[in-house]
Image (spheres, rainbow, N blue to C red):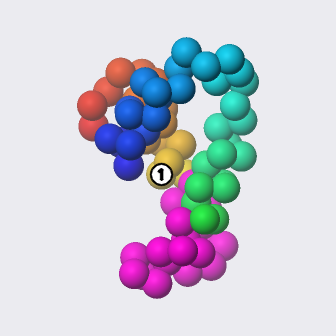
Amino acid sequence: MIFSLSENKEAFKKRKGYQNIDKELLAQKIANSTIKSCGYQLDLYGDKDIEEFANEYLIADNKIMNGEKR
């Protein structure tokens, strides 16, 4: 997840409106999509796991924004 966030940050940081993205909403949409399409393989199901995934996404995003590698 950290690698893909880093790559996306570099790809989109110069685009207009990048700074205005609602990261919590984005995290929820990514988590919902991931759990719906890959949840079975990841053994993740339901709202609790969607919330957990979204929180992990936000933690990883904060690490990337603060320049942390891990």
Query: Which residue is painted at 52% across and 60% down in the image?
Result: 53
Query: Which residue is painted at 43% across and 38% down in the image?
Result: 5
Query: Which residue is painted at 27% across and 31% down in the image?
Result: 69
| Residue 42 falls in image quadrant | bottom left
Q: Answer with left or right where residue 18 lies relative to residue 64.
A: right
In depth, the one of 24 and 5 nearer the eye is: 5
| Residue 17 falls in image quadrant | top right
- In the image, residue 38 sits, relative to residue 6, either above or below, namely below
The prevailing secondary structure element of the residues shown in magenta is: helix
In depth, the one of 44 and 5 nearer the eye is: 5
- Look at the image and give the residue range highlighted in magenta: 34-54
Q: Based on the picture, tell me whether residue 44 belongs to the magenta stretch.
A: yes
Total marks in image: 1
Quarter the C terminus occupies: top left
- In the image, residue 43 sits, relative to residue 48, either above or below, namely below
Quick one: which residue is furthest to the left in this view?
Answer: 69
Question: Is residue 63 in view?
Answer: no
| Residue 14 falls in image quadrant | top right
Q: Based on the picture, tell me whether residue 46 belongs to the magenta stretch.
A: yes
Question: What x and y, as percent, mark residue 37?
Answer: 54, 74
Q: Answer with left or right where residue 53 lies relative to residue 18.
A: left
Q: Answer with left or right where residue 24 lies relative to residue 65.
A: right
Badge 1 density bin: few <14, some 14–19, many ≥20, Cα 10 Å: some
Q: Answer with left or right where residue 12 lies relative to residue 18.
A: left
Which amino acid, mark 1? Glu
Question: Mark 1 = which residue?
Answer: 56
Question: What x and y, as percent, mark residue 58?
Answer: 53, 43
